Amino acid sequence: VSTLDASWWITAGRTNVQEEPEVKKEREAKDDGRYIIFYTFEDEEEED
Amino acid sequence: LNQLRWDPTLREWVAYATHRQDRTFLPPAEYCPLCPTRPGGFPTEVPRESYEIAVFENRFPSFAPNAPVPDEEGSVLTPTAPGRGICEVVLYSDDHDATLATMSERRIRNLIEVWADRYEELGASEEVEYVFIFENKGEAIGVTLHHPHGQIYGYPFIPPRPAKELEAAREYREHEEGRCLHCDLLSQEHEDARRVLIKGEHFTAFVPFYAHFPFEAHVYSRRCAPSIADLESAERRDLASVLKRLLVDYDSLFGFSLPYMMVMHQAPTDGGAYDGIAHFHIEFYPPNRTADKLKYLAGSETGAGAFIMDVLPEVSAETLRGKIEGS
């Protein structure tokens, strides 16, 4: 599996920026050429 | 093979994707292709030991980005076209036994972020005119994999049902001095109140006056936001809260995890103007009319397009509201 592009962080374009969960988006290529994207959220460790 | 054929009698495209006949069908949990790939285990669709939310291109897509021009040329009356588009699978969790109803509000909130991101990314693709986000849940709906997941179809056209809805909203706007059809429907539901299930700060869940399924529910944004990507942070948080409550109540309706189809209607991504016409909302269609009886789309529904209902929306809303108030 190769990484197609570097991990990047979605930044909020809306007004309440401080309330947006920060998310890491990683896009990778699968063995057959299809893509898979992993979304990891900073706030998930504080599960309610 | 991804091919479109035009039905001139209904004026709509039919998509053919014959490779889907070979897709994985209800594998045992230990061979679930949507679970993470465990050390020493068989390789699944997800080449990681764990994940939060993941999205990948469907292995058996109904539409594909590089679909070739069909060998079957059709005719002037019945043309064909390549079935070009994008089909994605959205994995809600790496927990095989979870459902949207059992997930935390925070996870649902994060899923909304992912849906919004996919709407924007797929919608930016030239071949995609409509981003359709949906979930089929339960064997009664025909799911082939139990792992909690939804799907996204990036259609190369605006599909018939949203197109019909948008046309109605456009005509209403023209004849009613610029008013939004969905805003007015929501106001009517608020005023009547008999079919309202949950009233959040920014979203309302209700059984529509004209429900087509016994326990159908719609979740409307109070503000006239054209798409999920237009929702503000507080709106996304409230949507997660309203969805969580509705799904928990659905599961308490008959005492089992309720099957449903969940679909999102929003602005097409064909470059048209949809402000005041497209109004983001989610529709749920559970097939159950009782715990052990299903509503089938039979002769009248399928052949005539006319739904026949044996439960009034006010009655099903009262039943659902009883569950909500008791929960």
Image: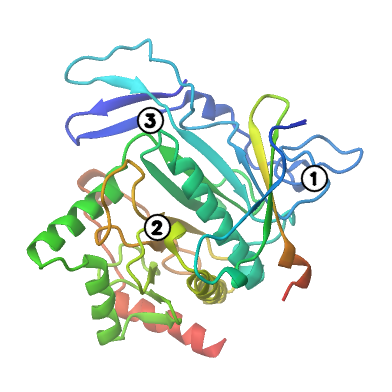
**Of marks 3 and 2, which one's residue comes earlier in the chain?**
3
Few, some or many residues within 10 Å of mark 2 (<14, 14–19, 20+): many
Q: Secondary structure at mark 3?
A: strand
Q: Secondary structure at mark 1?
A: helix
Picture quadrant of residue B38: top right
Q: Who is closer to the viewer here, B73 or B235?
A: B235
For badge 1, the amino acid type reads: Glu
Question: Residue B30 has which mark?
Answer: 1
Circle 2 residue: B227
Q: Is residue B273 above or below residue B63?
A: below
Q: Secondary structure at mark 2?
A: loop
For badge 3, the amino acid type reads: Ala
Marks 2, 1 in one chain? yes
Marks 3, 2 in one chain? yes
Picture quadrant of residue B80: top left
Between circles 2 and 1, the one closer to the viewer is 2
Question: Residue B15 has which mark?
Answer: 3
| Residue lying at 20% horizontally and 34% vertically, measured from the top left | B11
Between circles 1 and 3, the one closer to the viewer is 3
For this view, does B94 lie left or right of residue B321? right
The chain holding disc 3 is B
So how many labels did they put on this image? 3
**Of marks 2 and 1, which one's residue comes earlier in the chain?**
1
The chain holding disc 2 is B
